Amino acid sequence: MEASECLDPPSLHVESDKRTSNELTNAYKYETLLEIEFRILELFPGEPDDEIHCELRNEPMHTDNDKETDIHYEAVSYTWGAPTPKRQIVCSGKTLYIRMNLFQALKHIRRKDRIRRIWVDAICINQFNIPERNQHVQRMDSVFAGADRVLVWLGEESSEEGDGVLDVLPVWLALYPPHIDWYAAKIEWYTSSTFSFSPERLSKEAVEWLSYQQTHLMHLLHIFARQWWSRKWVIQEVVQAKEALIICGQEGISWAAISRYFNADQDKFSLWHDSLARIYDKHPDKAFVNHANDGIFHSRQLARIAANFHGPDALSLWNVVYETNDFKCAEPRDNLFSLFAIAADVRSSAKTDLLQVDYSDSTRKISINYCRWLLMHDPYALICLRTVTGSNGCSRDVPSWTPNIVPATWLRRPDLRRPFSMLSYDAGRLDRNPRPTWTLISEDRILSIKGVITDTITNIIPPPYIDITNPGWLHFGKAHAMWLGKCYDIVASQTANSERAIDLMYIILTCGGEKARGADVRDWKSPSVETFRRWLDVVLDEHSDSEPNVYADSELSAMTMSIAYAKLRQFCVTSKSRFGWVPEATRVGDKVCVLFGGKVPFAISECGRGHYNLMGEAYINGIMNGEALDSGLPDQMIELC
């Protein structure tokens, strides 16, 4: 349930004012709930065209022992949809108006022969009672965890999906793609629903896989383009469910039947997902395929979080925020509020005063409290600074050192999806400095934290523009080849010989090579230097005007994937002739610092009075493993504003 949907939309008040006295007299009036109660909707049986009749019953949510009572019901997970038009149902003989999507859901899930007991937020919560609404937001996890089953309503079926699309879904997910030479495949869309490919230079397996996609891909993309897959609140609704049923019109399939495919090995899922993205990269309807691509990715996130929810690998607060950063909610504060109940460290902590759900708090206060809580309860490697957005000039609203929770400003940043600190670096000597030294000053606006300033940025080569609304934004094209050519020329000009330049470029592009691979980074590949040399020959081929075929074989494809951490950032040179990668907002003249207790360096930008804006994580070759702290540079309290 999204908070913005919980809050009374202005249109509701207008509609109430326009009702006649007779309509107001006939409107359903909610009974007051006790603190330990919630409402269950008893949906009366009926035929598809019958009017919807129901009753609300107040039921106890917990016993005196704080254990769930033996109450049976199903919880409905859905999207509210457009506020108009509204449809009328009858609740205890009185009129109740609901939105169209919920009306259609009730029509489909209503039984023909017996009552169905359900919980659905728009009806079971009095939306005009603010205290009741806020209380239920904090108890949403208990409601869905206590349900016998969660009914996921995707919406009415459509002609684009065709009959039996949910039956095909498990087969489609299980069909693992072979290696495909995408340069030779020559994917072309000649309508919005059909594509062609060139089979001449492809293997038999590749032709069969692409042919299957020609038949089924668009039908299944329409399923994943539905709005439900992108809602932030559905994470806890599904993750905590004992059982979930996905419903689309008259069709249904259990969540378990498809989630096991989405929870597959990371390497397999990445190849499957990336192969699909290469097909619809050139689809004419970019908005549609972007929604579908998000839906597929979100399904993966849901499956992984659910599979680990009760085990030792359950996600901490920072990790669950990071893993779900592409999910959407209309209310910015719900980017955190919707996740508190499923974060392992929050669930197990007795000190959550900084993480209270309170919609009267500003986004700034919530962001600062979130960062403070992480510094106090999860300080390892300064993970709270991993996804800062970086900005030139002081922010009046949110300090640069806080992870901004407003989606428009950071959720679509591709570089924030791959923090350097997830790799095996130790710039801040965690063995000697396991916890950062920090304090908040100036009314919590400035984070003063111990570290050393090591370098000044003297040159920057920004990467080519990446359209991240395009599902194929990870594709490596001619523009990227030209960009890396400029970077290589700079490295070569400051290196003794070409052999040393190639070896150094390999280390820089792979951000340290195999030794940087962390146990928790399953999508990281580090091919050999020999593979890199062959890959570099393809990239730097001056005689070719076409896009470099860096996907010609599995080794070249793996090399292309291995530079993902570098590709999304700016190439830089420092005052001490070091090379590396810095965030997109970094400029010449900015500084590089290493903070005690951090795994990686950070780029910072001076903003006056001895204060700095935190631009974000950096990879600077030569100071990634404690060298800066061993160099004798003086440490200081760096004030981040």
Image (cartoon, rainbow, N blue to C red):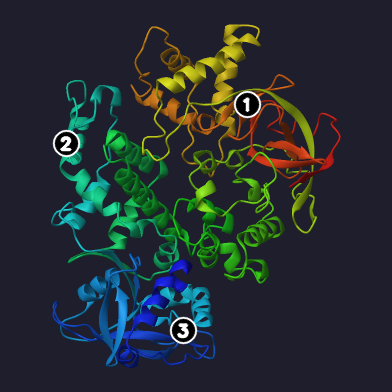
Residue identified by numbered label 1: 580
Q: The residue tagged with tag 1: helix, strand or loop?
A: strand
Label 3 vs label 1: CA separation?
A: 54 Å
Tag 1 or tag 3, which sits nearer the N-term? Answer: 3
Residue 160 screen position, x and y as percent: 17, 51
- Residue name at image x 47 percent, y 72 percent: 7
- In the rendered structure, are the residues bearing label 3 and label 1 in contact, judged by CB atoms less than 8 Å apart? no
Q: Nearer the viewer, mark 2 or mark 1?
A: 1
- Which mark, residue 614? none
Name the image quarter holding residue 422. top right
- Residue name at image x 18 percent, y 28 percent: 204
Q: Nearer the viewer, mark 3 or mark 1?
A: 1
Q: Is residue 536 above or below residue 357?
A: above
Q: Is residue 198 left or right of residue 519?
A: left
Q: Residues within 10 Å of mark 1 (few under 14, many from 20)?
A: many
Residue identified by numbered label 2: 211
- In the rendered structure, are the residues bearing label 2 and label 1 in contact, judged by CB atoms less than 8 Å apart? no
Residue identified by numbered label 3: 68
Q: State the residue in front, 295 or 499.
A: 295
- Residue name at image x 42 percent, y 10 percent: 541
- In the rendered structure, are the residues bearing label 2 and label 3 in contact, judged by CB atoms less than 8 Å apart? no
Q: Is residue 402 left or right of residue 593?
A: left
Disc 2 marks a residue whose amino acid type is Ser
Q: Residues within 10 Å of mark 3 (few under 14, many from 20)?
A: some
Tag 1 or tag 2, which sits nearer the N-term? Answer: 2
Disc 1 marks a residue whose amino acid type is Gly
Q: The residue tagged with tag 2: helix, strand or loop?
A: helix
Disc 3 marks a residue whose amino acid type is Glu
Q: The residue tagged with tag 3: helix, strand or loop?
A: loop
Name the image quarter holding residue 230. bottom left
